[in-house]
Amino acid sequence: MLSGKPLVRRFTKQCLTDRYQATWVSLVKQCTAHRSPGGMTAAALVLQRGLQDEAHGRIFRRQIYEWSRLDDLPDRLAEVITAACRDEMVVSHPDEALVRLHHVARRERGTLARDALVGLASGDRRLLRQMLNRLTDTRQERAKWPVDADLFLELADPAALTEADPRNHASPRSMVGRR
């Protein structure tokens, strides 16, 4: 008998194209709707395998984006999305992972996505700047969420933002002969 992981991997491989998106989307929803550890593992494996596929990963990233923006996002689906962004998507598409984590963090009742988002943004200056820009964007379509103020206060560490970084300033060597 096949164990769960090889079966899920084979299933996902068969569902990578646009044609079968509804099939794996339905599976992930069903697996996260029930309180079984095996279901959560299967849902995570489907997303992991899909995100790792170079040719079809965009389909999975797009679906995760759609889910992340649901106002009634189920907690267990949010947990699987958070893990997919934190563990897989960040490797090849960190900007997209940041955006999706932000959407989930705005909607979640716990702090799993928020903690992953803060960890991601805090670990990379470029992503930190991107996140701070998102949090201070005043365009109308970006409705202010109460969690955004808390995220801003947590991420806007004055010491980290003002600390000298050789990549951001001209080095003394590059200034030689420029007086």
Image: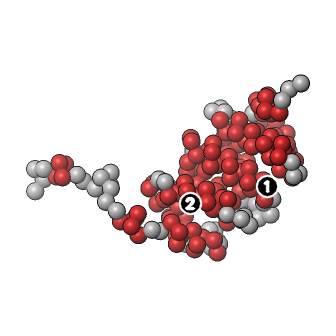
Q: Residues within 10 Å of mark 1 (few under 14, many from 20)?
A: some
The reply to whether residue 115 is visible in this rendering is yes
Q: Nearer the viewer, residue 89 or 142?
A: 89
Q: Position of residue 66 (x, y in %)?
A: 73, 53
Relative vertical location of residue 6 with respect to residue 65 in this rendering, above or below: above
- Residue to which mark 2 is pinned: 118
- Regarding mark 1 in the picture, which secondary structure is present there? helix
Locate residue 61, reporting x and y percent: 67, 45
Residue at the spot x=82%, y=36% of the render? 20
Amino acid under label 2?
Answer: Val
At x 46% / y 60%, what residue is drawn?
A: 129
Residue 150 image point, x, y percent:
58, 72
Q: In the figure, is residue 114 to the left or right of 171?
A: right
Mark 1 or mark 2, earlier in chain: 1
* Nearer to us in this view, 76 or 65: 76
Q: Nearer the viewer, residue 150 or 129?
A: 150
Q: State how the image is colored.
A: secondary structure
Relative side of 112 to 179, left or right: right
Residue 92 numbered tag:
none
Residue for badge 1: 76
Examine the image and state in which quarter residue 134 appears: bottom right
- Looking at the image, which residue is at 73% across and 54% down? 79
* Quadrant including the C terminus: bottom left
